[in-house]
Image (cartoon, rainbow, N blue to C red):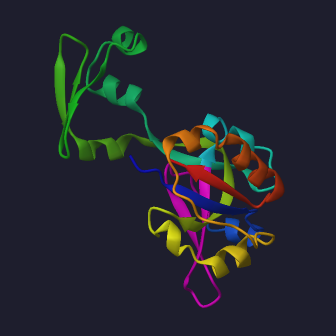
């Protein structure tokens, strides 16, 4: 089993950069271009304010709290228009049983209706979503580079203060004891973190 390490640098999005962020899309990012129109390597990532995976970043100096419209499907209206009983809808008895790229089967346990998925577009509504915007840039991903070929100049340029380091093979027993080094890294280098997955 292999483990991938990713070093990510954080920065606070500027007001100018946030102008491009006009809607909330889960699992998507807004790329930042340099002055010549090329991809600058940074991206603004949006997270729901109640997302527990980023709760430690919610009040950090890197996060900007914003409210953005998110397009969601009004399933209750769809189920009503399909003729399902109001009581069954209220009790959450109506649900999607089967779905593919083209069609969707919806049932209340007794009756089943099949619709074309394109019909969902007619039931999209904008909902105001509390979220945070964070500017992020991957400095190094061991899934893309061999650890022994880590670009020392890139690391020194982006993470000032690291000038002595060595490479060692990493195994599972070492990872079990790795919590303290990662915490020390985060405390001393507030603009970066290491994600392990």
Q: Quadrant of residue 120?
A: top left
Which residue sits at x=81%, y=70%? 161
Q: Nearer the viewer, residue 65 or 111?
A: 65
Vertically, is 78 above or below 24?
A: above
What are the residue bounds of the magenta stretch? 21-46
Residue 51 visible to an observer of this rendering = no
Which residue sits at x=55%, y=85%? 38
Q: Please say whether residue 38 is one of the residues in the magenta stretch.
A: yes
Vertically, is 51 above or below 63?
A: above
Residue 65 location, x and y as percent?
Answer: 74, 49
Residue 80 visible to an observer of this rendering = yes
Which residue sits at x=83%, y=56%? 188
Residue 131 location, x and y as percent?
Answer: 66, 45
Residue 33 location, x and y as percent?
Answer: 59, 79
Q: Nearer the viewer, residue 129 or 155?
A: 155
Vertically, is 28 above or below 173?
A: below
């Amino acid at each position: 089993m292999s483990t991938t390490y990713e070093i990510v640098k954080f920065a606070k999005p500027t007001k100018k950069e946030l102008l491009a962020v006009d809607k909330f899309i889960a699992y998507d990012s807004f790329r930042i271009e340099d002055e010549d129109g090329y991809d600058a390597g940074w991206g603004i990532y949006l997270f729901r304010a109640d997302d527990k995976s980023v709760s430690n970043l919610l009040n950090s100096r890197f996060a900007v709290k914003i409210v953005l419209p998110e397009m969601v499907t009004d399933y209750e209206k769809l189920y009503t228009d399909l003729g399902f009983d109001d009581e069954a809808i209220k009790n959450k008895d109506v649900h999607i049983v089967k779905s593919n790229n083209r069609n969707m089967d919806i049932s209340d346990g007794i009756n089943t209706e099949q619709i074309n998925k394109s019909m969902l577009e007619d039931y999209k509504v904008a909902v105001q979503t509390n979220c945070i915007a964070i500017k992020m840039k991957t400095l190094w991903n061991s899934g893309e580079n061999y650890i022994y070929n880590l670009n020392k100049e890139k690391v020194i340029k982006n993470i000032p203060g690291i000038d002595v380091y060595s490479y060692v093979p990493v195994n599972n027993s070492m990872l079990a004891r790795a919590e303290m080094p990662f915490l020390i890294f985060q405390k001393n280098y507030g603009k970066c973190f290491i994600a392990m997955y």
